[in-house]
Amino acid sequence: MSTQEPEATGPRSGFPVDTLSDAARSAPEGAPVRLAGRIVLWRRMGGLIFGHIQDRAGRVQVSLARDDFGAEDFLHWTKAVKIGDFIGVTGETYTTRRGEPTVRARELVVLNRTVRALPDKWAGLSNVEARYRRRYLDLLVNPESRDRFRTRAKVISRMRRFLDDADFLEVETPVLTEAASGAAARPFITRHNALGEDFYLRISPETFLKRIVVGSLDRVYELGRNFRNEGMDSSHLQEFTMLEWYAAYWDYRDNMAFVREMILAVLDDVVGSRTITFGGTKLDFGADWPEIDYRAEVERRTGVDLTVVRDLPALKARVAELGLECAGEVGATKSYAAGVDLLYKRTVRPHLIQPCFLVHHPAELVPLARRSDSDPSRLDMFQVVVDGAEIVKAYSELVDPAEQRRRLEEQAELRAAGDDETMMLEEDFIEAMEYGMPPMSGLGIGIDRFVALLTDAPTLREVVLFPTMRGAHRPADQDE
């Protein structure tokens, strides 16, 4: 029997494992096992010690018998480990009289010790921020948290496989960019000391992915971080994960069918059901997703006809005339697109609960999207909205370099007038378009929001391992 202690030799360099906790629990009686993990329970009951070992697969009970170890070593092990220590166990499986699958230890080794005691009843702490700051403790004691991040990994893996099977190529594009483009958002700015220039943390990989399509890689996707220096709430983070793809020769209708098929594949394979519950509301993804016209729905909810109200002064006047609750917020916006977007978010989006396609947005909203041939005042565009939140945004792409330049110059004018959430003009992007860009459709899906939806997480911080927090370096005792 081993009683080797790390105080004498230091933490062990390793311990060969042949069985995880879930396999040990389901193994037949008498199966030899060798496992390792963290002690989360340790108590003596007469001539037996019972403990629970936790590893990546869960927990399993282990027992030490005085008859196996001898009185001296048995007494040693009653005191030699404490909750939080890591141990390695060699033994065989059996079932206790109470029906609990257990590993009967024949050899036990302390692999490393905890210096800090684990907090009592951590899962019940009212200070939620403490769980985010010390995610390692949250993962350690909350199986729900571990399951949530396992689900996140499975969702991403299934999406990758879905795209790979459809002949998409995964690529990587720069995070440090010379211009903030691809979305309407305020960027983070950072200094590149070696070049002596300021760069932006990307707000979207869109324009780089389109450059790749110009290079004849017709279907590409990227899964990565984006950064937007704007408000933080339960459904917005400044650093977040997006999946974005582009397919040559598709239009937005092709993407509508494709993304629905992908989402259903994720639900089938990861969740096991096309109906989920979020915040107490049942959401049925298996039913038809209705198409809701953006402008018609805004008019129905507010009385503002966006086919007539086509500039910012008219929008502010109409909203004020109608006495809408969001009139003050709309009145403070600096562009027509921002005003319309805010009006929609305040009056329409909260009512879109079951999965739906929101289509035919006003043309002014997205400078990179293609206008409809049948009605140039609207875009060939859609969003997937669920429970009042945007999950997907996609459109047929604008591929005319002259028209793209004109629209981005309009954005530059708005920026000069004080709207810091407009897109920047990228000469290299326009030049790439001038070499010829095939018709295509692109799509972006927010991974954090989607996973939060599938795991019934009330805030995006629950599905991000280490979310950015105010006072990130605050001493530990200030959280409790």
Image (cartoon, helix red, strand yellow):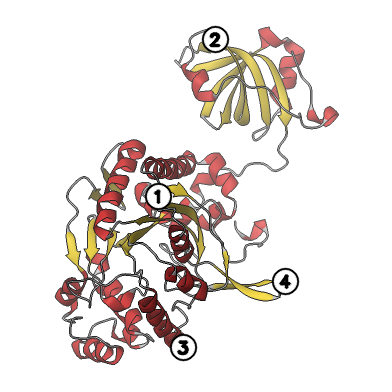
Q: Amino acid at mark 1?
A: Val
Residue 204 x, y percent position in the rendering: 47, 65
Residue that badge 3 annotates: 418
Residue 213 x, y percent position in the rendering: 43, 58
Disc 2 and disc 1: Cα gap in Å? 38 Å
Q: Is residue 128 above or below residue 415?
A: above
Residue that badge 2 annotates: 31
Q: Amino acid at mark 4?
A: Asn
Q: Amino acid at mark 3?
A: Gly
What label sits on residue 193 in the rendered view? 4
Instruction: Provide the secondary structure element on which disc 4 rests.
Output: loop
Left or right of 226 on screen, residue 77: right
Q: Nearer the viewer, residue 328 or 40?
A: 328
Single out the mark in the foreground, 4 or 1: 4
Residue that badge 1 annotates: 451
Q: Nearer the viewer, residue 181 or 70?
A: 181
Crowding at label 1, few (<14), some or many (≥20) Cα neighbours within 10 Å? Answer: many
